[in-house]
Amino acid sequence: GNQTVLSETYYNLTVNNSTGVKTAGGALDIDGDLTITAGTLAMGANSADVASGKTVYVDGTLTISSGSFVANGPTDISGTLSITTTGDYDANGTFTAASGIVNFDGAGFLKCASTVTSLGTLSNDAGTVIYDANDNGFQNIISDTYYNLTFDGNQINRFSSGSINVNGNLVVNGTNTFFVDSYSATVTGTSDINGLLSISAGTFTANGPTDIAGTLRIT
């Protein structure tokens, strides 16, 4: 049945009950792995922090409404990650949802600071995916249909692994570079370029307004 998960510092924390909802009673500090084998862990407005090098496994459902969930190690979604209202999931480690679902229901955020191998079945009618690696290097962008897509971080060169569709707005911030090489990118809403958008053999289609405070380079 339903249970409250006490606001505590845990080592490993496991949710394994397909009936009822396990609701966080406050902030959760997890120094080991978080494993949701079955059932739902509902964070609500509460925050959670999972330690570096430790994994978040979601085979059931993890819901976040207006809270912030920070995963400092790998994230493996085989079930459902549901981000509603203004909640955010901050994946500082690798992220995969190859056989899972990433669902947005509102103005929530999925932040990806490391390697992303799959976004699974991704909502494309709400929410924002932010690629925010910050190590002066490269970050590959998953070929998918997004709602809002933002590139943040410091001096990062971003390449897509295939065509990208953005049903909402695209934002390229600061010292970021978004390369559109042999693939296409199509934006329905606003294309807000504060960094560098570089187009070579690919095609960039802006069906909405374009605001360039940075640089547009076509080679």
Image (tube, rainbow, N blue to C red):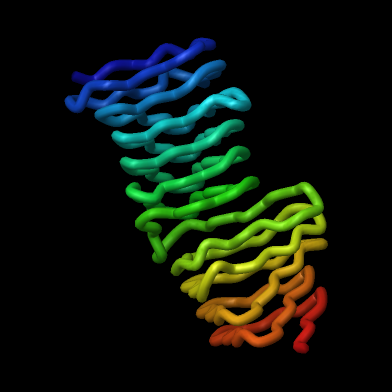
Location of residue 171 in the rendering, given as x and y in whole percent from the top left corner? 66, 67
Q: Quadrant of the N terminus?
A: top left
Q: Is residue 4 above or below residue 93?
A: above
- The residue shown at (62%, 26%) is 52
Q: How many marks?
A: 0
Q: Horizontal placement of 93 versus 97: left or right?
A: right
Q: Quadrant of the C terminus?
A: bottom right
Q: Horizontal placement of 23 versus 18: left or right?
A: right
- The residue shown at (58%, 32%) is 73
Location of residue 156 in the rendering, given as x and y in whole percent from the top left corner? 76, 58
Q: Is residue 96 above or below residue 190?
A: above
Q: Horizontal placement of 31 versus 218: left or right?
A: left
Location of residue 65 in the rendering, given as x and y in whole percent from the top left corner? 43, 40
Q: Is residue 62 above or below residue 198?
A: above
- The residue shown at (51%, 35%) is 67
Location of residue 66 in the rendering, given as x and y in whole percent from the top left corner? 49, 39
- The residue shown at (78%, 47%) is 135
Quarter of the rendering containing residue 216 = bottom right
Q: Is residue 165 above or below residue 118?
A: below
The foreground one among 152 and 97 is 97
Quarter of the rendering containing residue 184 = bottom right
Q: Horizontal placement of 45 versus 156: left or right?
A: left
